[in-house]
Image (cartoon, rainbow, N blue to C red):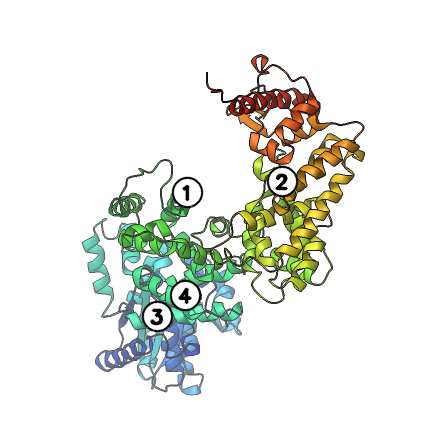
Amino acid sequence: MSILYGDDPLIIANHGEGLGRERIVSRILSSLNVLRSRTPSAVAALVGSWGSGKTTLLNEVEAALATSEEWRVAKYNPWSYSSLDTAVPGFFSEIRAALPGDSKNSGAREAIGGWISRLAPLGQLGSVVGADLSAPAKILADLVIGDRSPEKLRSDAEDLLRDLDTPILMLIDDLDRLGPDELLMTFKLVRLLGRLPNIYYLLSYDEKTLQDVLLRTGLVADEKSRAREYMEKMIQLRLDIPTMLPEDRLDLVNAVLKEVLTNHRLDLTEQDMKRMSQSWGKCLDVYINQPRAAKRLFTQVDATWMDVAGEVDFVDFVLMTFMRTFEPSVYHLVERRADELLSPSGSYWNVRSKESHRDRWDRWLGHIKEEGAQHPQEMRELLAEMFVPLRSARDNMEYGSAMKSDLSNRKGVGHPDYFHRYTQIGIPRSDIAESTVLECLRELQESRPGIAVATVESKLRKDAPLVVAKLMRHTEGSDVPVEGLMRLLGKNYDAIGAAESGFLAYRPTWSALQLAQRLIPPAPEDAIPIIKASCETLSGLTLVSDLLRQLIRSPGEEEAEQPPKWMEQAGEFVANEIESYLSVVEEKTSDADFERAFRNIYALRDLTSQTHVQKVLWDLIGSWRNRDVADVLVVLSPLGHGSDGTNEWRTVGDLEAETVDSMLGIEKVAATLGDLPSPSSRTDLRAHFDHDPTLDERRPYALASFARIVKSFREQHEGVDPSP
């Protein structure tokens, strides 16, 4: 049976040694036995705050007495009755039901039964719980017989109950949940009508709440001191539930945590347990000091975990659920200040850049106090366990990339890619589920691309860094679908670059290159087939071309002296593929196809030589019928993107002299073009286009830019200072 849901009491017998409550039960039983030996009837009270486990203790007392011949137990809960008229006879019917059923006690049962009939309207007798109304005619007769008056019936009951061998203990729970009228009636029953020989009472309530209800009755004239005096007069023995000991609280939390872990088939690592323990000692311990508090927290965790299972870190989810449940105002503070908490350094536009660690640590304590937190210091410590900027402030140090990697690997709340999964308790629309990424990898591994691959592909085009970061976490094993992933990256590489740059410039997308570099195996016999498969599309060829350029231009420290073994063979293959695309470029009629064919011309130069790329290009230009060298200058001219915050536009940038010279040769281009525009009549290169300009629209800007290159080039070679 679950110990989490509803407001049901914990069933202690099912959870070790009773979470420290067994000694309290023993003390209650011992006190009741003393009470029994001192007085024929008395009222005891089990006093504890809401959530302290009063109902659990009453159940344990009842269970302990069930195996004992020293007491008989009756239970009365005013909530079981719909009105005061039914509650009164119900009270006595519970006493009557607790009496032994043998003939010796039949008189007492009959007397109490008659008393019930006298106290309740005839039409409501059928609603009395536990009353034996099998002979209504006899009860009706008792009502009109003179010697069966309520006073006579009470006297008879007292005489008969005095001879009971076994006393009755009446358990009355949830007094603190009654309204003023219900509470007064229950006290009247206990104080004035229920004080019968061998009848004892154990009431259960939260004292503060009960006093507040008494103040609303007018009985104590709105004075708390009189409310206390009234309760002292009612109660002969007060049994307070002590604060749970630290080890008992830990046992309790371990019990409910174990159920959650079992329900969801979860195993916590040693590191998880360490983090949970640290958070407990720094914060949770002061909040979870009663059984109901533990149930309240882990019921929330159990009920919502399935929405984020596998998508977030379990320990962080527990901590965020704790904060949302016990300190909702601080939880909303975290949401409002997420930009700061998710920033690596904790500094963002509205936080003073020169703020010291101590100042930030103190400032956050102020924020938490403003939210009215019960324990501000402890809540600040809890936030420092989850968010790096506050941990840095607390520890007076900056944490490096290792901390960020840890957050990313375990999908921690302090990482910007995962924060909103915790606050949304699910996957936001801007995100993609880890389960989808894993299913995508399975589909690629089994060569059966389906919905997951399509979903990942769509998201990859919109937010490549996000998707690549997730893929990187799952590409360290031996069963990674390398070829499938490389095909997927290659197919979408140009679209990714366009999305990241904001216009059709096809810039390299570094996150995709990073993943590609990790995927390609080191051995040439393994790498080359994957590279060839990746180059089946022009976009894929661009991916591999950019990767090779990156390795050539920026080798890592370990790779500086020894590049990947597959690079030379891959370079030859890629260079041939680039030339193949260029060889048929004129047959492509659209400007976009023409320009895309030249996307990898820089890679061809870096993979071969300037001499080789110049020969390839001039041979190509010589074979054209409809295009000329000016078209090559156009595609070598960079496109720009401008904005004033409201409007956006496209611009054409200047050609670079080094690029033109290495690709074509400046003098040879000038000789081929003949007359060039006068540099003095320069076309405004800051002209705005509200669309992607065509090659013809960009042509004047490219020629004007080349004319300035020629002028500067010739002046430099003639020894003329080109500066004005």
Q: Is residue 692 visible?
A: no
- Residue 70 location, quadrant: bottom left
Q: Would you place residue 526 above or below residue 214 in this image?
A: below
Which three-letter amino acid code belongs to the residue tagged 2? Gln
Q: Position of residue 611 (x, y in %)?
A: 65, 40
Q: Secondary structure at mark 3?
A: helix
Q: Which sits earlier in the primary sequence, circle 3 or circle 1?
A: 3
What's the residue at 62%, 21% (across, down)?
Answer: 701
Per the model, the C-alpha gap separating discs 3 and 1 is 35 Å
Q: Secondary structure at mark 1?
A: helix
Which three-letter amino acid code belongs to the residue tagged 4? Asn
Q: Position of residue 706 (x, y in %)?
A: 61, 23
Query: Which of the numbered marks, if any, corresponds to residue 339?
Result: 1
Which three-letter amino acid code belongs to the residue tagged 3? Leu
Per the model, the C-alpha gap separating discs 3 and 4 is 32 Å
Q: Is residue 101 visible?
A: yes
CB under 8 Å between callouts 4 and 2?
no
Q: Position of residue 258 (x, y in %)?
A: 45, 71
CB under 8 Å between callouts 2 and 3?
no
Which three-letter amino acid code belongs to the residue tagged 1? Asp
Per the model, the C-alpha gap separating discs 2 and 1 is 48 Å
Q: Would you place residue 1 above or below residue 601 in this image?
A: below
Residue of label 4: 77
Q: Which sits earlier in the primary sequence, circle 2 or circle 1?
A: 1
Residue of label 3: 250
Q: Residues within 10 Å of mark 3 (few under 14, many from 20)?
A: some
Which callout, 3 or 1, points to the residue nearer the camera? 1
Residues 561 and 364: in front is 561
